[in-house]
Image (cartoon, rainbow, N blue to C red):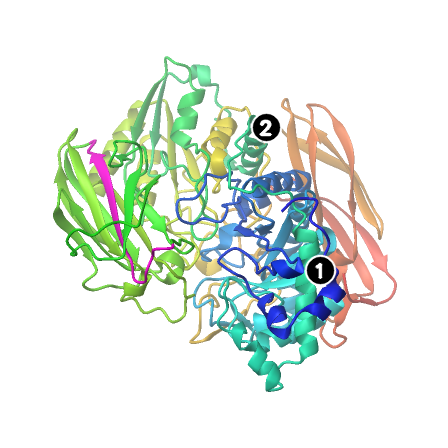
Amino acid sequence: MSESTKDIDVEETLAALSLKDKISLLSGSGIWDTASLPDHGIPSVRCTDGPNGARGSRYFNPVPALCIPCGTGLGATWNPELIRRAGELLSRECEAKGAHIWLGPTVNIVRGPLNGRGFESFSEDPYLGGILAGEIIRGVQSRGTSAALKHFVANDQETQKMTVDVRMSERALHEVYLKPFQMAVKNGNPKILMTSYNKVNGTHVSENAPMLQDVVRKDWGFDGLIMSDWFGVYSCAESINAGVDLEMPGPSYLRSQAADQVRDGKIETETIDDRARQVLNFLNYAAKAPVSDTETSRDTPEDRELNRRLAGESVVLLKNSGGLLPLDPTTCDEVAIIGPNAKLAMACGGGSASLQPYYTSSVFQAIKDQLPEHAKVHYEPGVFGHVLLPVLTSEHVTNDAGEPGASIELFNEPASTPGRKPFDSHTLPDTTYQLMDYWHPEMKDPFYVSMRANYVAEYDGTHDFGLAVYGIAKLYINDELVIDNESSQTPGGMFFGKGTVQVRGTYEMQAGQPYTLRVEAGSAALSKVETPDSMAIPGGALRLGGCVHIEPQDGIRRAAELAKRCQHVFVVAGLNSDLEKEGKDRESMSLPPHVDDLVGAVLEANPDAVVVTQAGNPIALPWRDRAKTVLHSWYGGNEAGNAVADVVFGRVNPSGKLPVTFPARLEDGPSFLSFGADNVSIYYAEDVFVGHRWFEARKIEPAFAFGHGLSYTTFTTSDMQVSEKEATITIENTGSRAGSEVLRLYISHKGKSRFIRPVRTLGGFQKVSLEPGEKKRAALPIDKHGTSVWDEAKKAWCVEAGEYVASVAAGEGTTVLEGRFSVGEDVFWTGL
């Protein structure tokens, strides 16, 4: 499409369309595209997955893409202006990928640490999430791209997400879970709202007319498109009548029944017109987005600079009790970099948020790059932190022609068929594939895949290999069968919940010797895995991983010996896309087996070791009291490793603040007894006491509090003035380095209230950047969103009469100053 695309005369077009034509507009024409009617001048537009990039239209062998930090990483910046610039960057990526619609942002609440997809969201706090969502939407849509605010609503876990009935009070629904959507609609005006998979209080959201019509359309005045999540529609008449304008993907089996249901009186023709009208109105906006005709890459120095700033501002310095950081790289003559995540480029989590990055940066390489040439850098993994054996990338394997990557051929016959001919072939960047959106004109169903990779062993000894598949697969090494994941299969949560466990095998190898890895596989139709609660995705998928075998005791011993003899030691540990991914929740806050033992042993050998953690959600840190220096990075996008090194060596003064609470124990958190599913439902028993509200009300000391984050400089605040409209405060940089501080405004109701309230509620924030010795006067507006609660009796928001305390927190989270204001009488309001 181009900017010259002509507007559709909506009413005239509706009058000219047949019922069949109107119905065809209400679902997609493929995985990523909407339906077109060229004879009526109705174009198709294309979607691309977000929220931390723009993958493009291909899961299979995708065009490389920009990857920004994950949602919680963006939340840790507490920087709305910067997040808006990130949205503008994502819009440019969408243009390059030929996409009119960016499927993001995710504003679901991080109500506990175990949500497999929690890393996509901004925060546990609805106010912080809502503000940042509005800004990234404004950035994305500033260039004509459409943003799809998701997943509406309470899609806060992966366990049974298609069927689970999320039950909660009306207050919790409005004050916590609807709130970030409400704020994002108000401040960002997204063109699309995407419905979630789950039920809320007994009804699937995609069939919930009170939610979609009464709340979204009438109360909020939302006039954009309501779209389903992929395969997130479970009915024809119910979803159309409830207000879902567009079902994705297509073609739809369910909505093909709509004409019959109109005939049977289950759907009114006027309702079909209403849904088609919304689609046409949306197309008048979306089709004008200037997009490339072919998917391309646009990796520029300016983009890299902005992305590095995003990643740098996301890093949170949790501890620096010995003042070790920042390090002067010229004093680092001998450095040990230890840990399972040291050489892993932690760009993004797993599932629909994953993509093929333009480039990546690991902590190991980034630290090494910033050290002087004479510095000796030692590496020891200690133990592996993967659940799934690491994928073999183009750094490890070559294809049939000897080029980096793996060869893949596709057939309509199984490997046992003599003389079979491939109908397609490709080179992949690694030993994985996802065929959900793959198509070829000669392809039948089922079809078969042969993947080959040449591997040269780096070490002598036993090597572990693992094969997970959605379909069937067998691994051969030098034509010897090593893994059979075909004869019998066990569900494992891979590939949006449709895949097997990773089946493992071993093979003895010699360093420097070449080996041929060959996987013979079959498509999704051949899978023996039964997963009725997960989405029905086509094609199939496969993941082959492998590495040398390490005995944990030996690896930990070698790591500790290395740490003891080096002055500067870094231990890098955390999670990865095996553990944080769409389709499966985590089972605990713990790091992978033996990783905490490794960190403890390194700290015992060298108490000054710097611990770097990487995860998208809170993790357990049982060694935190022994560690003097801890910094937390997230899934940091292309610049993940560089951002950590920038903070370590002082090129960036850390300003990240936790957007989520890190509990000392999982049992301390608000969702401990109410996460997952209780047969077919789950009740949000913590009610409005989510995240930091819970810990403050219960007086439970977390490991690291919401809003915590240290700097290399110091700040003081003074002269706070409070009115009913705003709080103003002076902040000064009293240290020797330029830095940024986040001022957080909390509102508390004092005296007798008819509502059970949190101790305090986040009602505003501002990030302030200051040179050494510089002062600034900051103004934090006080608005109805900071003072209101949902009145279930009135079915409206209520600013309750009484006295309020406005308190400003900064630094390590202590309340530094406060003031009071009064509201004379109850004020009720609805809408935005």
**In percent of the image, x 56 and y 27: which residue is there?**
652
Question: Percent from the top left, x then y, of residue 400?
Answer: 24, 36
Q: Which residues are magenta?
A: 441-458
> Which residue carries the number 1 mark?
281
Above or below, 376 relative to 729: above
Q: Is residue 539 magenta?
A: no
**Toward the viewer: 507 or 747?**
507
Label 2 neighbour load within 10 Å: few <14, some 14-19, many 20+: few
Which residue is at the far front?
39
For the C terminus, the image quarter is bottom right
**In percent of the image, x 48 and y 26: which residue is there?**
324
Badge 2 marks a residue whose secondary structure is helix
Relative to residue 749, is residue 307 drawn left or right?
Answer: left
Q: Is residue 760 visible?
A: no
Question: Percent from the top left, x then y, of residue 232?
Answer: 51, 67
Q: Is residue 453 magenta?
A: yes
| Distance (Cα) linking label 2 and label 1 | 35 Å
**Toward the viewer: 554 or 136?**
136
> Which residue carries the number 2 mark?
302
Q: Amino acid at mark 2?
A: Glu
Relative to residue 510, is residue 74 drawn left or right?
Answer: right
Classify residue 364 by image quadrant.
top left
Classify residue 493 by image quadrant.
bottom left
Relative to residue 589, is residue 720 drawn left or right?
Answer: right
Classify residue 196 by image quadrant.
bottom right
Question: Percent from the top left, x then y, of residue 419?
Answer: 17, 51
